[in-house]
Structures are given as structure tokens and as C-alpha cells.
Image (cartoon, rainbow, N blue to C red):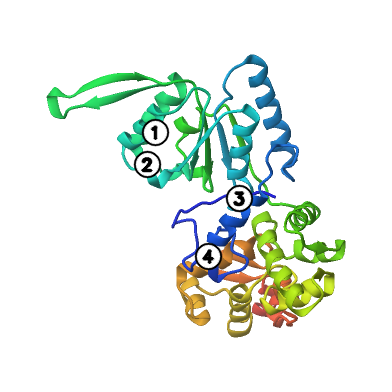
Amino acid sequence: MNWDDPTDPTDTPAAPAAERLVDSVADREDQAVEAALRPKDLGEFIGQEKVREQLDLVLRAARARGATADHVLLSGAPGLGKTTLSMIIAAEMGAPIRITSGPAIQHAGDLAAILSSLQEGEVLFLDEIHRMSRPAEEMLYMAMEDFRVDVIVGKGPGATAIPLELPPFTLVGATTRAGLLPPPLRDRFGFTAHMEFYEPAELQRVIHRSAHLLDVEIDPAGAAEIAGRSRGTPRIANRLLRRVRDYAQVKADGVITRDIASAALAVYEVDGRGLDRLDRAVLEALLKLFGGGPVGLSTLAVAVGEERETVEEVAEPFLVREGLLARTPRGRVATPAAWNHLGLTPPRSQGGGNGQQDLFGA
């Protein structure tokens, strides 16, 4: 059960997060609930087995040496547990944690003010680290490597650099776009980990734990139904659980079964594969209006009645990951799985896989 709170406008959908039940970006309600549901140590943390094992070794070794832990870089999609892991790192090391984000650090002076106030051994969590300004980024190189920063006093020819020694600290950087980090910054992290999407069985464990903490009664079949629609993301699983809980309290006896979960999520327009109204609208337009494609992104967006950025950044990533849509040089193309999911029959030109049979009359 693991969550993050990225706020990068280039990473987040054009529509507000609260408008989509299956959005992996945390809204205010999510943030309030997640504070109570976050696991407190690695033993409670569900999923990400390799990352947990490797991180446990790093932290245990640091504690045995009586030293601060190596700097840690966590990458992966929103809602998978980067913020939670940063808090666990601080708890495991018995250290306080300072939380900030890349967009909040636009000048080197901003970073210098934060670094100069750190205590020895403190954990500095820097979310969306790839959005930090270049001057601050260059200052961070020296701080991470030598625990020192040069503060520039004055301007022009009379400017002087005053070296400022920093206490040893641990930087935990989180990013949804690891490829945007410059190599010199990536190389200064002693431990890097990529957070993977969760398997349904892992999400069921997340849901059962959350249901217990929320005092919600749920059976295994109900948890499995919610997990299968959660897009491999614990944050979405917990959001769906809360909405199904509401339905069960109002429409049933408060117990979440498979039938109750299915009926509740039908009300919220989340289907068996986790597609919502926008996802299905994109697929239906692609299949029914354009015969499965290829069709340009702008044309598809107009057909759906959404902005181009909304279709590209909100709907397409999950549809591509699910194998329902493909991005090609000629445009967007539906896969056979998309036709099957909507219960439609593809035209003959799609039956051969590439359409060449009809083209040449074979």
C-alpha cells in the first residue's frame, strides 16, 4: 500500500485528478487518507519485493556502520510508493525527514537555505527531482558528494564564494521521468530503484490491509474484483475501495462482496479491466468511427471531444500498457484485444493482422 504525490503539470493529466476515479495522481482526499494508511516500516510495505530486499540491505549496513544511508533515487509511475518509501527510510534510520519538491526549488539560494538547515543524518525527500532548476541542480552535485555548498555573496566582479560545510544527510529523490535526470545527478545516487506496477495478488493484500484499517468488511472475492480494476496501482486500489465501501453502506449491508464491488464500480463507470469513461470513449471512437485506425491524435481527440493533451497524456498510456492501442508512425491503431474488449468485430482488413491481404486481393 504505497503512494506518492507528484505535482508535475507535464506529468499529470490535463483534467483535474478528482474527475477520474482511476487517476494515479493524489487529490486532497487521497492525501488525507493516505497519511493514515501508509505503512511505517519495510515489514509492512506490500509489493516491490526486490526493491524492499535491496533497500533493507542498504539501510541495515548503514545502521551497522553508524553512518548515514547512501543517497537513494526512486523512479516509477505515480501512486506506487515513492513517498511512502522515503518516509520508511527515515523511520528505519531513526532520522527526521524534510519534504520538498523540484518545482519548489527554482534558485540555488532556495536549495542552499534547505541544505544549510538540515540536521546530521536527516533525510531530505525531493519529489519530482527532474524539475529542479539547473543552478540548483549543479549546487546539489557538490552537496551530495562532498557535503558542502558554495554560497555566492555579491554580484559581478566583486562576488565571492563562501564555502558552507553541511552535516551528512541522505537525499531521497523521486521522479516519474528518470530519463530527464542528467547523468551527473544520477551517478551521485548510491542506490537507485525502479518501482514496478503491482500484480493483482499484491493489490488484494493492499486492499485487505486498507479495509482493516478503515474498518470495512470485505471478502476475498470482493478484494479480487477491486484489485483487477486498479491498474496495478495501490493508490487507485484504495480509492476504489473507498467508493465501493460507500456503495456497500448505502445499497447493501456494508459487506463488500464480488457482486457488490462489481455493481459499485459499474456505477462509477470503471469496467473489468480498469477502463473508465474516457478510456472507453477513445477506444469506441477509434473502432467505430475510424475502423480501428490508423488515425491521427488530433483527429481522435476531436472525435472524443477532449483536448489532444488529455487523450495523449491521460488515456493513452494505460491503453498502450494494456495492449489495447498502439502508437504507430501513421497514427493510433487499435489492437485485436481492443475489439474483443468492446465486443466488436474488426473489419476484414484487420483480420489478417496488417491489412495487406485485402490490399493485394490475396
Q: CA distance from mark 4 to mark 3?
A: 18 Å
Q: CA distance from mark 4 to mark 2?
A: 24 Å
Give the mark nearest the N terminus, 4 or 1: 4
Give the mark nearest the N terminus, 3 or 1: 3
Compared to residue 108, the image places residue 320 above or below, namely below
Instruction: Point out residue 158 in the picture as x, y percentages from the top left corner.
Output: 13, 23
Name the secondary structure under disc 4: helix
Front disc: 4 or 3: 3
Give the mark nearest the N terminus, 4 or 3: 4
Residue type at numbered disc 4: Ala
Give the mark nearest the N terminus, 2 or 1: 2
- Quadrant for the C terminus in the image: bottom right
On residue 35, which mark appears? Answer: 3
Instruction: Point out residue 84 in the picture as x, y percentages from the top left corner.
Output: 62, 44
Front disc: 2 or 1: 1
Residue wearing tag 2: 105
Dot 1 alpha-carbon crowd within 10 angstroms: few under 14, some 14 to 19, many 20 or more: few
Residue type at numbered disc 2: Ile
Give the mark nearest the N terminus, 2 or 3: 3
Name the secondary structure under disc 3: helix
Compared to residue 185, the image places residue 349 above or below, namely below
Left or right: 281, with 230 as reference point: left
Q: CA distance from mark 2 to mark 1?
A: 10 Å
Residue wearing tag 1: 114
Left or right: 69, with 260 as reference point: left
Judge by depth and name the residue closer to the eye, 354 or 251.
Answer: 251
Residue wearing tag 4: 17
Name the secondary structure under disc 1: helix
The answer to whether the residues at label 2 and label 1 have Cβ atoms under 8 Å apart is yes
Residue farthest to the bottom, as pictured: 289
Dot 4 alpha-carbon crowd within 10 angstroms: few under 14, some 14 to 19, many 20 or more: some
